Amino acid sequence: MISAPIPFNEISRLSSLHDYNILYSGNETNYDEIVELASFICDTPIAYISLIDSEKQWFKAKVGIDITETPREIAFCAHAILKDDILVINDTLTDKRFADNPLVTSDPNIRFYAGAQLTTEDGFNIGTLCAVDKKPRKLTEDQLKSLKFLAKQVIRNFELRKLNSNLTKQSDELKEQNVIKDNLLKVISHDLRAPFNSILGFTELLKENINHLSKNEIKLISSSIAETSENSYELVNNLLNWAVLNQNDEKEKSIIDLQEMLKQIISVLNGLSTKKSISINTIFNDTISVKSNYDMLYSILLNLISNSIKNTHNNGEINIEIDSSTSEVQIKISDNGVGMSNKQIDKLLNANNFQINSDQKGENVTGVGFSLVKNFLQKINGNLKIDSIIGLGTTIIINLPNN
């Protein structure tokens, strides 16, 4: 037996195959009908649609055989995908490539094989439509022509299947975006109106009573105005980030030095952490990089670290660790702040986008920041886990593809 060599364009060929997302999918009537028709036209007891993956031959549809896959090294179709035209073996016992092949010497005892290439629109042979018999034979020109025509129908079905899948995905994404936008408008209406009303109220109080207020009272009111303004600015900034980045292509990726990104974020948040005398420690040895969307990942880490600072007591500590020893890059942000209950964690993780949450003081604040984190993590194929104990602190773990 002679196994087929690997095609020179194997990486691109496999990529084209995987784009269809059809390997190991369930039975589908249109493909079953094509192999039935191929068997009828070619007058063979066996017909199948074979797809050649990196290590296996897998049958999308079949008639006359029970097996669903074989090792690639014994696949007739692995030879067929190397050719530009249909591969025909009238008698396998007279062909040194196949005479002692297990598929010839044992079940299904192939003696005749004809495989028409499944050629994608971009020119890659990803498999074959085959007609097989247990005895030597020949096909007529009309039968060969029909087999090649049916192979083209298989590819057209693959393309239609991919198109429908993409349309469904786009439709789902549009529905999700519409839900997010509806919730976003509710948050804008609630969370922007309240702080501005508060600021207007405080400024009116100062304007009308400036000559009657003590220095401490003026200082207290001014501090309230400043704090409310900072919260409003952060809210607006998060909303703008979400709006701008959602218009961009989330697939736009670059190589990101995580240590450098964290240094920049810690520097940006230095004023907030210094004000509370909070130390931020980074724990990593070697340079660790990921391939991801820079702006989205930056917004995720900025929001989470900023939130950790806000929920950590004065003179507290925040530790940031990075680990790339597994198939994922793990970023762990731990603080010794107020912590959360399991109920609060579940509510935070499972809430719809842009809900209203409560801060450590029990005051109503926007959930835009965390909703942005969840939204962006989903877009960059990341995930998040929260461990927390009330009074002891919170650990947030982000997992990103290690590519």
Image (cartoon, grey):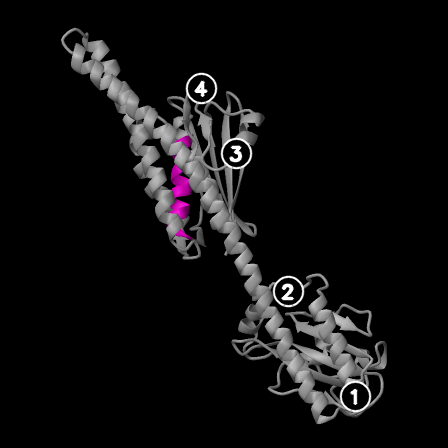
Is there a contact, CB below 8 Å, between mark 1 and mark 3?
no
Q: Is residue 152 magenta?
A: no
Q: Could you tell me the amino acid type at mark 2?
A: Ile
**Disc assigned to residue 351:** 3
Is residue 305 shown to the viewer in this render?
A: no
x and y percentages locating residue 301 in the rendered image: 41, 41
Q: Could you tell me the amino acid type at mark 1?
A: Thr
- Which of discs 1 and 3 lies nearer the camera? The answer is 3
For the residue labelled by badge 3, is the local secondary structure a helix, a strand or a loop? Answer: loop
According to the picture, the residue beneath numbered tag 4 turns out to be 362
Distance between the alpha carbons at the discs numbered 1 and 3: 62 Å
- Which of discs 3 and 4 lies nearer the camera? The answer is 3
Q: Could you tell me the amino acid type at mark 3?
A: Ala
Q: Earlier in the sequence, mark 4 or mark 1?
A: 1
Extent of the magenta region: 293-307
Residue at point 69%, 63% (across, down): 24
Q: Label 3 crowding class (10 Å Cα cut-off): few <14, some 14-19, many 20+?
A: some
